[in-house]
C-alpha cells in the first residue's frame, strides 16, 4: 500500500533536505509525492507593485517554479518515486493545507527554513503554521 505525500518545495536548502529524506524513506514507506510550490503574490501588492509589474513577476515566478519542480521531479522519478507537481498562488501555509485537504493527501512532509528563532517568533514560519493549521499528519524534516 502506498501513501500520498504532499511535499511543499521552494529552492532552499530546507526543500533539498526534504527531498533527500523522501528518497531515503522510499523503501520503508512506499509513497506517491505531489510537489507543491506556492507563489505568494499578496506580498507584492503589499509592497506597492503595480498590477502590470505583478503580472510580469507572476509570469517569471511561474517559469522559475516550473524549472525547479522539473529538477525535483527528475530527482525523485530517477529513484522510482511516482511524482506529480503543481504551482499555486496564495499564502503558503493556507495554500498547503487547502491543497492537502482537496487532494486527499495522507501526510505533509515539510522542512522548516533555518531562519533565526527571533524571526520565527515574530512572524512564524510556514512549517509552524502548517503544523498548527493542517488537519492531517505533518512530518517536519530537520
Image: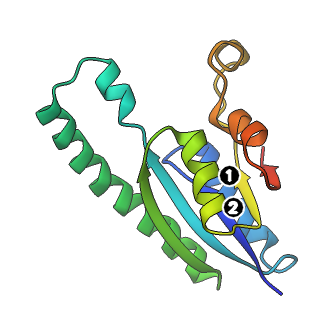
> In the depicted view, which residue is nearer to us: 87 or 101?
101
Q: Residue at the spot x=88%, y=77% of the render?
A: 28
Residue 48, quarter of the rendered image = top left
Mark seen at residue 1: none
Characterize the local packing of mark 2: few (<14), some (14-19) or many (20 or more) Cα atoms within 10 angstroms: few
Q: Is residue 119 above or below residue 50?
A: above
Q: Residue furthest left?
A: 52
The residue labelled by disc 1 is 17
Q: Is residue 107 above or below residue 118?
A: below
Rendering coords of residue 31 (x, y %): 74, 77
In this rendering, would 10 be left or right of 108? left
Q: Residue at the spot x=51%, y=66% of the render?
A: 72
Rendering coords of residue 24 (x, y %): 78, 69
Element at label 2: helix
Mark 2 and mark 1 in contact? Answer it, CB < 8 Å: yes
Q: Is residue 111 above or below residue 43?
A: below
The residue labelled by disc 2 is 20
Q: Residue at the spot x=72%, y=57% of the render?
A: 108
The colouring scheme, among rainbow, by chain, secondary structure or one colour, is rainbow
Q: Quadrant of the N terminus?
A: bottom right
Element at label 1: helix
> In the depicted view, which residue is nearer to us: 91 or 58?
91
Residue 83, quarter of the rendered image = bottom right
Rendering coords of residue 12 (x, y %): 54, 43
Residue 109, quarter of the rendered image = bottom right
In this rendering, would 17 be left or right of 55? right
Q: Residue at the spot x=48%, y=53% of the render?
A: 37
Q: Report how far apart the C-alphas of labels 2 and 1 lie in the structure.
A: 5 Å
Rendering coords of residue 30 (x, y %): 79, 81
Number of numbered discs on residues: 2
Amino acid at each position: 500500500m502506498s501513501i500520498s505525500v504532499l511535499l511543499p518545495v521552494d529552492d532552499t536548502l530546507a526543500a533539498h533536505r526534504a527531498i533527500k529524506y523522501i528518497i531515503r524513506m522510499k523503501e520503508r514507506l512506499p509513497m506517491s509525492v505531489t510537489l507543491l510550490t506556492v507563489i505568494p503574490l499578496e506580498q507584492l501588492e503589499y509592497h506597492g507593485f503595480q498590477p502590470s509589474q505583478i503580472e510580469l513577476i507572476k509570469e517569471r515566478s511561474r517559469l522559475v517554479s516550473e524549472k525547479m519542480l522539473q529538477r525535483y521531479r527528475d530527482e525523485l522519478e530517477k529513484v522510482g518515486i511516482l511524482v506529480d507537481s503543481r504551482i499555486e498562488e496564495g499564502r503558503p501555509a493556507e495554500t498547503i493545507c487547502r491543497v492537502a485537504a482537496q487532494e486527499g493527501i495522507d501526510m505533509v512532509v515539510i522542512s522548516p527554513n533555518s531562519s533565526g528563532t527571533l524571526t520565527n517568533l515574530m512572524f512564524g514560519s510556514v512549517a509552524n503554521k502548517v503544523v498548527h493549521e493542517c488537519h492531517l499528519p505533518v512530518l517536519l524534516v530537520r
